[in-house]
Amino acid sequence: MSTCTPQPPLGLAELGASMYELVAELYPICRSITGDGVRQTLAVIQRHTPLTIHEVPSGTRVFDWTVPKEWNIRDAFIARTTGERLIDFKSSSLHVVNYSVAVKKRVSRDELLAHVHTLPEHPEWIPYRTSYYEESWGFCLSHKDSLNLTDDEYDVCIDASLEPGALTYGEAFLRGATSDEVLFTCHVCHPSLANDNLSGIAVLTFLARHLATRVRHYSYRFLFIPATIGAITWLARNEQRVNDIKHGLVVAGVGNAAPTTYKRSRRGNADIDRAVAHVLKHAGNDYDILDFFPYGYDERQFCSPGFDLPVGCLMRTPYSRYPEYHTSADNLEFVQPGALAGSLALCMSVVDVLEHNQTYRSRNPKCEPQLGRRGLYRTVGGRRDARVDELAVLWVLNLSDGTHTLLDIAEASQMAFHTIRNAAEALRAAHLLERCP
Ligand code: ZN
């Protein structure tokens, strides 16, 4: 796939800059699937959009899983026996294997190296590693730095705790005219990784802020959750209400300057799948659409067969398909304000389709109504409303038989949704169209 530089319309450039600032502010925080890093992150998001914070105690059963002990870290280092720190957690939260248990001891070089992870193929980069479900300890460092570990002994310290506590997640709910919901979710469990984690957080924070000011047909639910265990926990606690979810998107990895990739829901032809595909087709940029597969982000849980929710996944380069993925190179240079803005604009356009995807019935179905005298068709010497596309008017009139939605008509006509919607509104204003319940 070729790279492209998104060109956001006016206004979005400022939003892109604001989202980038949020990414930069959250970047240094050491997040994990539980702990104070998530709480700090949610507190920052709350400055932009109201959130309800949920705390689910360690040990809570959630389907086949158990909410784990809470992990917190204060400090960590590898030091020479003279006390000189060679690797310092304070310079990068990636330096410690996420969920490492505490350790403080003098170790031989060989023992240390058995607990060190590097990326020889990218000797300057620090890898991101986790050990959520196995109690162990480890350090991540650039391969270059690991080659300098030539002393016989080192002092290692990970000042961390793994104790009963809670899993924390944030939820924002915007009530609409109907209880039917659109779900947006992102993960908040990665430490200093800008695209995989913070880009999704920034786009959804600003999308929630935008939608809060709008008249809404749908209700909107935003989840800021740790990956996998957070989605499983939310689903276990909200099993009774998932039927309200009519459309949903997992948003992740949307900040790098690459074309958008959309991964369809398990259903494959849900309205969300069609709406995203339609918006991408008419946006004028390169894009890719993938069928569902049971790997990736939290669509794995929302699309598990017991739920099978209409939830797709919006990304730019898919997870693991870019070399910077899960390394220190997924940093503030990898994410770009214009890419964040383009992803936000895409989400807004998808919401626009969902909000206005009504079904109408022509009030004049027997032959075409006379459009010229209503200003809806070209007339010699007459006036014409140039804002309304004549062909779109004919498509809407013909297919508005009570069974086709505006998205159906947009797809059939190969025209952009907003063109079809404008035509429908003009026809309604001319009393030629009525909305079906
Ligand atoms: Zn990840």
Image (cartoon, rainbow, N blue to C red):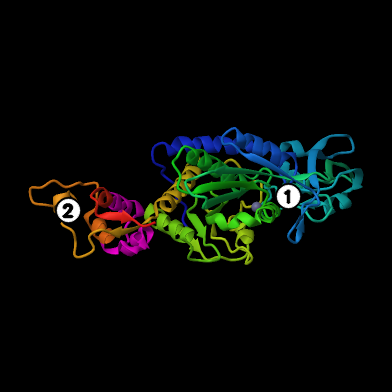
Amino acid of disc 1: His
Q: Establish if 303 lies above or below 110.
A: below
436 vs 161, nearest the viewer: 436
Question: Taken as a whole, is the magenta stretch helix, strand or loop?
Answer: helix
Magenta residue check for 419: yes
Magenta residue check for 317: no
x, y (%) of residue 72?
A: 79, 41
Amino acid of disc 2: Tyr
Residue 65 quadrant: bottom right
Q: Establish if 314 lies above or below 105.
A: below
> Which mark is on residue 394?
none
Which residue position holds label 1?
143
x, y (%) of residue 334?
A: 56, 45
Q: CA distance from mark 1 to mark 2?
A: 69 Å
Q: Establish if 266 lies above or below 59.
A: below
> Which mark is on residue 377?
2
Q: Nearer the viewer, mark 1 or mark 2?
A: 2
> Does the residue at mark 1 contact the one at mark 2 (Cβ under 8 Å)?
no
What residue is at 48 percent from the left and 41 percent from the top? 211
Residues in magenta, as a range? 398-425
The reply to whether the residue tagged 1 has its Cβ within 8 angstroms of ligand 1 is no
